[in-house]
Image (cartoon, rainbow, N blue to C red):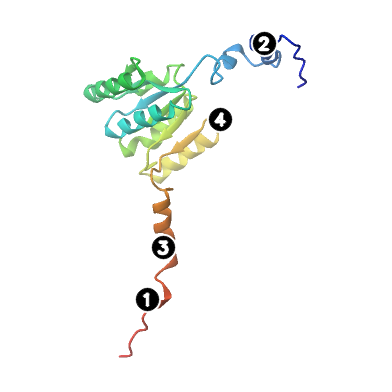
Amino acid sequence: MKNDSAPGSDRREFLKQAAGTVIAAGIPARSYARIIGANDRIQIAQLGCGDRSMGHVHMVQLSAKQTPVETMAVCDIWRLAREARAKQVSEAFNNQPKMYKYSEEMLANKDVDAVMIATGDFQHAKLCAEVVQAGKDCYVEKPFANVLEEAKRTRAIVKASKQMVQMGSQHRSEPYQLAVRDLVRAGPPAEEITPATPA
């Protein structure tokens, strides 16, 4: 792309030209509007509002310091958990999140870009598949599944999609964990190995 900027060209003119290029390329205006920083923030929903999701909201809050992201919805069949997480979100982001009892209703919301799953372990794979099939990115807690066939089915759905999916593995890659792993793999130091005494 050549630079045709004339003296006096400004950012507004550049954006008009860029928008024209996007439309000419066949990309719908709605997609252009979804570009991070254009007019929007990444809108995240919390699926499962127990204690683990408290950490999820906190992670999003920390990320919001550097990335345009916020939690905009919470979903849980238990009203008390749902309301508690909504209160945390309201305080963290200064907005009133949408509250859903059922995940199907939340996934139908076109404003939700991504979902963080913190439900019961046995639900993770099934819900991850539903999130991806709804066209949303997903962060899913470990364990991914309790049944191998569910894990394989959801993995196939994810691989066939364009969605980004990450399974949580908090603390598994921190330096102290890696150091312990390396120590275990290395075995005891040679000087500490004592030969067996003959019987």
Can you see residue 101? no
Residue at the extreme bottom: 199
User: Is 33 situated above or below 179?
Assistant: above
Q: Nearer the viewer, residue 195 or 27?
A: 195
| CA–CA distance in space, label 3 to label 2 | 58 Å
Q: Which mark is residue 183?
A: 3
Location of mark 1 (residue): 192
Question: Disc 3 vs disc 2: which is toward the camera?
Answer: 2
Q: Which mark is residue 162?
A: 4
Q: Please report whichever mark, 3 or 1, sits nearer to the chain's N-terminal start.
A: 3
Query: Could you tell me residue 167's position as x and y percent?
Result: 43, 39
- 87 left or right, relative to 41: left
Name the amino acid type tagged 4.
Lys
- 54 left or right, relative to 190: left
Residue plotted at (35% across, 30% down): 58
User: Is 95 situated above or below 168?
Assistant: above
Q: Secondary structure at mark 2?
A: loop
